[in-house]
Image (tube, rainbow, N blue to C red):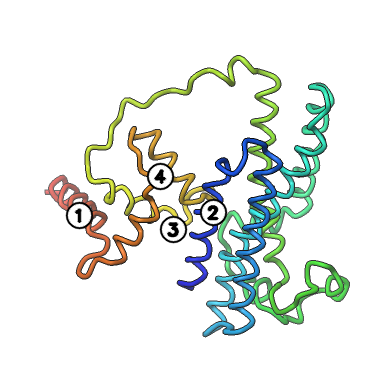
Amino acid sequence: MGTFCEIILELENDLSRMKKVSEKLPDQMEYAIGHCKIALDRMRELVINHGFPDQESEIYFFKKIKPTVYSKLLYYRAVFDLESKCQKADTSVIRRYLQKRLYKINEYMEEHQVKVQYFKCGYKHLDEKYFVRGTTEIPLELRGSHHLMDEDFFTWHDHTFSVILANEMLTEYIRKELERIDRPAEFNQSHYKSPLKWTGHKIDLGEIIYALLYSGVVNNGNASIIELAEAFEQIFNVEIKEDIYRYRLDIQRRKIERTKFLNQLIAILRRMIDEKDE
């Protein structure tokens, strides 16, 4: 799965430069959509040409890895669509349209409540039916669906999981836009500034950020490395986003102890807990 992870990291690196491409949101969305398509094409080529070593790897790809990229493509397409429709409308029309779109998202999530629960709770008992290609469990009426035209690169529910992830991102986007409309003064106020400052090595913070990224514990695994880096910049008043990819390479190049700082944290925590128990 290492190569797939590299594709995702390259995509996130490309997406982090989105705002430098243009100040116009539609241009940014076109840029993002293009790079998501490129990433998916690269993944498809790997899957078709090399396959998977075992079924567990196939399940992990279609359940976790592919939706990470495909959901971004769906999200950026949806934002582009929203922006296109709202570009010249007045505030009241934009508000109604955003609320209507939010209603449709909630309708989809309710209609697919069982799958949403399976996704959010991390269930595994149906993985072989949901995330293995060529399964006979796929209903016949869905086999002609455009979602499954490329049966070598689609499973029954990797599309569903991608839509769920995209809907979560789109819901957050719409809520912020509604907040911007309804409370412009409050929205534009300066955000709270953290009194905390990171005083350790930046690469140590990089270990923590990548551990959170790969563990998938933030936003159900849908937070990007750039989003995580930006969050830590705000919390600890430290500049780390620009060098976050270099820190990953530096960590990989370590010959002896790659997760040196995380191992130190574990040792310190265990020692303190043991002392409390005595």
Whichever of callouts 4 and 3 sits on the residue coming sooner in the sequence is: 3
Q: Mark 2, mark 3: which one is toward the viewer?
A: 2
- What separation in Å lies between label 4 and label 1 (alpha carbons)? 23 Å
The three-letter amino acid code for the residue at tag 4 is Lys
- What separation in Å lies between label 4 and label 3 (alpha carbons)? 19 Å
Q: Which residue shows up at 44% across the image and 59% down it?
A: 214
Whichever of callouts 1 and 3 sits on the residue coming sooner in the sequence is: 3
The three-letter amino acid code for the residue at tag 1 is Gln
Whichever of callouts 4 and 1 sits on the residue coming sooner in the sequence is: 4
Q: Is residue 40 above or below residue 273?
A: below
Q: Is residue 24 above or below residue 180?
A: below
Q: Foreground residue, 22 or 129?
A: 22
- What separation in Å lies between label 2 and label 1 (alpha carbons)? 33 Å
- What separation in Å lies between label 4 and label 2 (alpha carbons)? 13 Å
How far across and down, in percent of the image, does residue 243 sit?
36, 49
Q: Mark 2, mark 1: which one is toward the viewer?
A: 2
**Residue 234, numbered label:** none
- Would you name the residue on which mark 1 appears? 264
Q: Foreground residue, 16 or 227?
A: 16
Question: Could you say which quadrant of the image residue 174 lies in?
Answer: top right
The three-letter amino acid code for the residue at tag 3 is Ser
Pointers 2 and 3 in contact (C-beta within 8 Å): no
- Would you name the residue on which mark 3 appears? 215
Q: Considering the numbered disc 3 on the image, is that residue within a helix, a strand or a loop?
A: helix
How far across and down, in percent of the image, does residue 44 sit?
64, 74
Q: Which residue shows up at 32% across the image and 54% down it?
A: 207
- Would you name the residue on which mark 2 appears? 14
